[in-house]
Amino acid sequence: MQIFPRKLNLLPLVLGAAVFIAGGAVTFGVWYYFSPKNLQVGYAPQQPVPYSHRLHAGELGMDCRYCHANAERSYEAMVPPTQTCMGCHNIVRTDSARLEPVRQSWQTNDPIPWTRVHKLPDHVFFDHSVHLAAAVGCVTCHGRIDQMDVVRQDQPLSMAWCLDCHRDPGPNLRPRTETTNMQWQPDEAWTAHLDERVAALNPPSHCSGCHR
Amino acid sequence: MNDHEKTLPEPRVWRSLDELHSDGPRDMRTDHEKTPGALLETHSLLGRRGFIQYTGATAAALGMSACIRRPVEQIMPYSRAPEYQVPGVPLHYATAVSHRGDAIGVLATQHDGRPTKLEGNPDHTGSRGALGLLQQQAIWDLYDPDRARVPAHREGDSLLDSSFEAFDEAFGALIATHAANAGRGLRVLTRGTTSPSFMRLREAAKARLPQLRFHTWDSVNEANVLAGAHLAYGQQLGTVVDYGASRVVLAIDSDFLGTEPGALRAARAFGPTRAIERPDQEMSRLYVVESTFSVTGGAADHRLRLAPSQIEGYLRALARTLQSKGGFDLGAIAPAIIAAPLDAFSAHSAWLNTVADDLLAHRGTAPVVLGSGHAPALHALVHAINVALGNVGRSVKYFAPVDAAATDPVADLKALVADIGSGAVQTVIVLGANPVYDAPADVDVRAAFGHEGLTLVHLSSHREETSELATWHVPEAHFLETWGDHRAIDGTVSPQQPLVAPLWGGRAPIELLARLAGEANWRSHYVVQQTFRSRFPAPGSFGREWRRTLHRGVVAGTGGVPVQPPLIQAPAIATALAQAGETAAEGIELVFLPDSRLFDGRYANNIWALELPDPMTKIVWDNAALMSPATAARLSVRNNDVMRVSVGDASIEIPAFVLPGHADDTFTLHLGWGRPSAGRYGAGKGFDLRPLRSSAHMHHVAGATVAKAGRTYNVVHTQEHGSMEGRPLALDATLEAWRADPRFAQFRSVDPTEGPLWQRQDYSTGHQWGMTIDLGSCTGCNACVIACQAENNIPVVGKAEVARGRQMSWMRIDRYFVGDENDPRVALSPVACQQCEEAPCENVCPVTATSHSPEGLNDMAYNRCVGTRYCANNCPYKVRRFNYLSWHEYLDGDPELIGGVPTLTPTYGNMPETRKMQYNPNVTVRMRGVMEKCSYCVQRIEAAKIATRRDDRDMRDGDIVTACQQTCPTGAISFGDLNDPRSNVARKVRLDRGYHLLAELGVHPRTTFLARIRNANPAMGTPAAAASEEAEG
């Protein structure tokens, strides 16, 4: 007696295909969506002081290096000490309630506990100074900071993303004088000499370039 | 469902007949399942189901954790930023440290406020840019978690934590009491000092408290050397041998490259005279006569082993032989040595006649040096010989004494103990010394310090043996935490500049002295500035000169000017020689030497020092009774047999260890071990020699009796094997042989002419890093090993794990014995990753965690490594190290484990915070399950490359200095760009004595060894050398 209909003979095949497709979909989903591009980009934590880059760097036009003074000297761009804030704010908006944590830090000598937005793993030794020496603009990795009220991670900062540029740095290079210019666009005079710049640069793409 | 269906009886559904006939559904559960928890009780802690549940939950949790964002991290900028401190950019400060009556200039690196690494100050004559082993490891002591943190005060039988305020008050009251009675009954016991501030305050304190008396105690001291010079010249003089200006050196029981005073200074000068690049260059020759086998003996061209009691006879016989030759006159000393018997050395006639001829042939450049363990009269004789050889002013220089008030520590300590016993002393202030641990056995410091009514103030870094008897214990600040100053033996004055405020508070010896001297402001900064004020007397110049001095680390214009010694006091020497004289005794002779790593015990809690292999025996975490193979055979003992060694009534038990090349019927015993209160890591490690050391025999004693104790003790060492098994590993040749066959090394270690099966990478462009290690100047001192450990965050694994072969040091110094078992030569070979161009490790890594950089580096990506260990198995040099456990935390996991008791369940996470502060932030701290190895200090390479790009310039030779190269006292290591034809390393790689280790494998190492050249004297006969040539094939 035939209990199961004949068409069920296809079941293993259908099941196999379903597992394959579902597995593939899950794998793809994890591989694609669980990547820094989707999980890290857009991270914009609340900071202890509602500092606005849009106001300072955008509207007031302050240079990035006024506060991040060590970006060209150290591996860290440096979050400025309270001192830097107070340089202006002991004259400007001295009674603003939003600046209360800054004044407090200045009085107590305690640091302001900023939340890190751009975080690389501990085994990555990234150096701001050499990237600025190579004339990669701030905007390349950090996005349009001058338009952000709250700083948001703009790029995935993943290893693949780093290597994309290390293998082909040309599109991300600019004149050294323009590194902090958020609106700079390459012109023909620049692109004409880009190949020479790239050849002289030769950024590392071997392990110890970043992992030590 | 409708009403109709409801009324129908439901048919019973059953699965088996048992179920059908039973009352209800059958309980299918097992007994375990019926009783909750039964499984856990009856079986292991975690049952099968629990295990699967936890595993599943863990896997899920891990999976989830990968999805969510990494933990929130905060950035804490300064409120007010210190000047010059750029976050992320290390700062370097010049400072100085004192060692054995000499000063050593240090450049200390500080990362964001944490001192992390010490290097030599090139402007200081005592270091000239290098550092010895003891100075390298000193950084660890700063972060020693067992350092005393608060003063302690005695309440009854115990020391109770107190506070600095309470101590300051009590100390003030104590001084006030003694100020009222002019210092009667007040004694200060210090270590020997090189500090001008210390000496100034000592005089000031004496002036204020006329009856105050100072005593000095150091168990390893330079008293014989100083007394010898005083005897020879009738005045205090510091002696410096200029090895750089020497052609022939005769070292008699003097480990002048290792543990003797001024060893770093000596090695800096001596190294270049051994590293000749062409066969036609002149090379120095080193004769060594010694009882133990020291690193200096390893570096010797000719070495004679003699028991310590024969050393004096040899020296007298040599003097007599010299005197008998023409043109050499010891003057009034001659009659005293004319009686010297030569018979005892008939077997070694070359060691008298030929050596004497060689010394005489190189008058002026042929210093004779004697070890600090020998009597002043013999030192005086050596001074007389150096005068007669015309060495004075050329290769032997004299300087004004560092501390003109230096005394004989043994007599001084005895006097103190006697005075305490007579009740004349009410208060003893001990500054740094630890006499309860290291005083001679016949000086009962423990009883004296326990004297009824005695107030004992002890200043030391740890609560140690002496502290246990103290009324007050005060933590001593580390030299990187406090101001000070040092005067080197050649007169160079250096400030000791702190890099960090005391981590837990602490006082400097000069601070307590300043209070004794009645200074209102006793802070070390002020005290040292006061001392320097007299140096810069010009009005208004002090601030500028002080800053300039701090910047350079030396006071400009000081030092380097020798004094002309007065005429030698021949009659006095003759009298002293007539009175001196070793009396040989039956039995075993014992030699007490400072340990190369723990020195006199002050580094006994330093884990780097504890796990550093001894340069000759390669023993770690212990000391042992070293003896020659012949003596071991005669006593029928083997390694690890515990011996009871007795001198008179006193005896200790210590394991035996056979060291080829040791003098027969003599044991070498290293000091500094067996400290009961060293700290959590060092307490009880090794064996204390104190019972055997009496005040009359501080350095060696004859007539010891030994017996087997009938048990064994596991001594762990890192090199089981002393033979090269006929392979060309550490190559050497005599100068003559080299001249006859300049490329001998490459003929013996042949690079294959055929390449690998695959296409070789092109290394002809860009930077190509390479290293050369000159075996001619390497002494095997181990400074590089510690420098590497400090630079690269290398963990320590403990004795039990070293016994399993799991030591982690990236650099090891292979020590081979060549030739006769009883009288071998030593061949050394420092081996780190050779950075093979065709690296066998790379081919077998399944995850490409190790791969090649275009600059020729064998890169290691720790985060890719999955720990298969294939690479280590495939490495022909065995330089890869595996983190079997999380070593950094492991040592602190289980107190018992620190003692080397093997257990598999350490509790992690107990690592003291301070130890983390030492880590170099530019090097990953590796975790469990990861392979690691020498990276050629890739962090320094990348930092230099970044600097050149930042400054828009080309890389210059010398921009990159690896940690091992930086510290090497003899300059044996060179590093640089092989593609830069002007670089030092490119020149050395092409030297004709260069060769590759295991070259025949065709892995093309980037490290080139330069074969050692021995300047053997053909007239000496070279039985050992000839034998070795055969043995090596």
Image: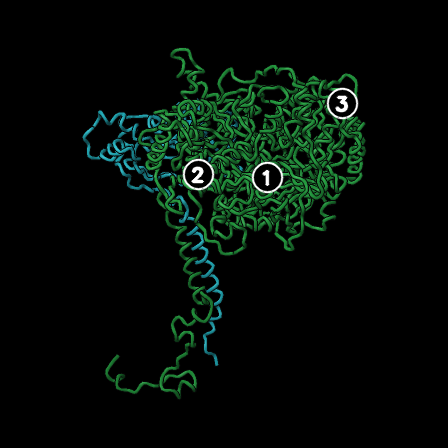
Residue found at x 44% / y 43%: B468
Task: Find numbered disc 1 in the image and state the secondary structure of the residue it sits on.
Answer: loop
Task: Indicate which disc residue B694 carries.
Answer: 1
Task: Indicate which disc residue B322 carries.
Answer: 3
Does residue B293 sit above or below A185 in this rendering? below
Q: CA distance from mark 1 to mark 2?
A: 41 Å
Residue at the limit of the structure toward the bottom, as seen here = B21
Q: Can you identify the residue that label 2 sits on?
A: B917
Does residue B596 sit above or below B225 in this rendering? below
Asked which colour scheme the image uses, the reply is: by chain
Task: Find numbered disc 3 in the image and state the secondary structure of the residue it sits on.
Answer: helix
- Rendered hue of chain B is green
Instruction: Indicate the amino acid at tag 1.
Output: Ser
Letter of the chain in cyan: A
Q: Is B805 situated left or right of B190 in this image?
A: right
Q: Is residue A197 visible?
A: no
